[in-house]
Amino acid sequence: MIVQQRVVLLLLGLWSSVFKGGQGQFPTTQNVTVVEGGTANMTCRVEYNDNTSLQWSNPAQQTLFFGDKKALRDNRIELVRASWQELTISVNDATLGDEGLYTCSLFTMPIKITRAYLTVLGVPERPEIIGFTKPAVERDMVTLTCASAGSKPAATIRWFRNDKEVQAREHSL
């Protein structure tokens, strides 16, 4: 009877370590939002790792970092931290073209992946008013257009006359 109890305990201990390894060996990430021109830090973590490498890939599935080894020659992408439990990279001077779904892979058998979406917010350019060619006389019908490019999401344009908001018809170009 005592021998059977020891065997059961040994098997339960073995099952626990196998189960823990299987459960904790999934990488986790979070979506990141950055303003255009800013720096985005993207972190991939794994709770339990048996000396298996982590890798970050961009939306085109090009490897950025494999562990602490840089794979893509883009000076804007840098290593922040590399350990067995974490791989953090930074995307400096972020552009709208950097936006997309990034992949973190843990090279187990089979490979385990997780994804994080990088959202880049576009900064609107200075608004420009078009259609103001000559001074308007009272009761004249005047059509003015205000345009601002580069905003993501689209900017909200509001018109004011003598500090009072004026309703305008809106359309996107």
Image (cartoon, rainbow, N blue to C red):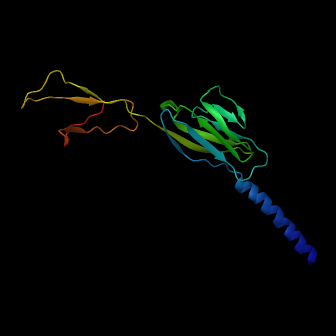
Q: Position of residue 23 (x, y in %)?
A: 70, 56
**With 120 as the anchor, is 140 left or right in this view?**
left
Name the residue at the front extreme: 162
Image location (x, y in percent) of residue 39:
55, 36
Residue located at (26% from left, 30% from top): 146
Foreground of the two, 129 or 50: 129
Relative to 70, 150 lies left or right: left
Q: Residue drawn 85% across and 70% down?
A: 8
Tell me which corner region of the image, top left, top right, bottom left or bottom right, holds residue 121: top left
Report the quarter where the N terminus lies: bottom right
- Quick one: which residue is furthest to the left in this view? 139
Q: Position of residue 12 (x, y in %)?
A: 81, 67
Q: Nearer the viewer, residue 45 or 7?
A: 45
- Image coordinates of residue 5 in percent, x first then y, are 88, 74
Count of all numbered marks drawn on residues in the image: 0
Compared to 134, does 17 lie above or below? Answer: below
> Is 93 situated left or right of 68 in this image?
left
Farthest-out residue, bottom: 1
* Left or right, residue 5 beside residue 130: right
**Quadrant occupied by the C terminus:** top left
Residue at image coords 57%, 47% = 30
